[in-house]
Amino acid sequence: MKSVKAHIVRTLTTGTYLKCDDNSGAKILMIIGVQRYKGVRGRYPKAGVGDVVICSVKKGDPKMVGTVVKAVITRQRKEYRRFSGYRVSFEDNAAVVINEEGIPVGTEVKGVVAREAAERFPKVAGIAQGVV
């Protein structure tokens, strides 16, 4: 996985609700785990922009509700600092559902995608409205 060119503050823990930003059928996701997270005993796993999380679908298409999916976080409310000096924050927490190979399940992303997530997942950036 490609490294991120920013100091991302990882504030999204297990139990956090995310807006699903694509047309895969899911509307609301809840984080139940974080891939590639190594922590100490008793500490909640946490994630930020560009991380892959394991989610449970809470609202959306009836056949998709309750399923466990992987998603990449595309936006977060908490500001983070890029190495150029800019501080970036968004108005909501959002994610895009992906499959095992990192290819998005939906065919379009409704909102913008952070540049850090777009560098790691170019297929997600290809179907997004914009990259910030």
Image (cartoon, rainbow, N blue to C red):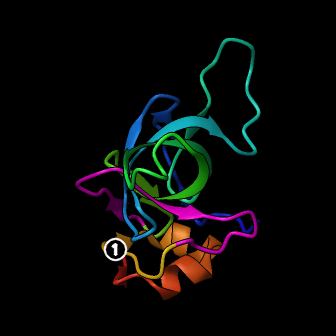
Residue 94 location in percent, x, y?
38, 55
Residue 15 higher or lower than 11, as above or below: above
In the image, is residue 22 part of the stretch drawn in magenta? no
Magenta region, main secondary structure: loop
The amino acid type of the residue labelled 1 equals: Val
Residue identifier under label 1: 112
130 left or right of 43 in image: left
Element type at marker 1?
A: strand
Task: Determine the residue positioned at 63% across, 35% down.
Answer: 33
Q: Nearer the viewer, residue 9 or 113?
A: 113
Residue 20 location in percent, x, y?
39, 57
Task: Determine the residue positioned at 49% across, 74% down.
Answer: 106
In the rendered image, the residue lying farthest to the bottom is: 126
Task: Determine the residue positioned at 42% across, 34% down.
Answer: 16
Q: Nearer the viewer, residue 48 or 83?
A: 48
In the rendered image, the residue lying farthest to the left is: 91
102 left or right of 16 in image: right
- The magenta region covers 85-105
In which quadrant will I find the C terminus? bottom left
Q: Nearer the viewer, residue 26 or 50?
A: 26
Q: Nearer the viewer, residue 17 or 59?
A: 59
61 left or right of 64 in image: left
In which quadrant will I find the N terminus? bottom right
In the image, is residue 100 part of the stretch drawn in magenta? yes
Residue 95 location in percent, x, y?
45, 57
In the rendered image, the residue lying farthest to the front is: 63
32 left or right of 24 in image: right
* Picture quadrant of residue 131: bottom left
Residue 65 higher or lower than 1, as above or below: above
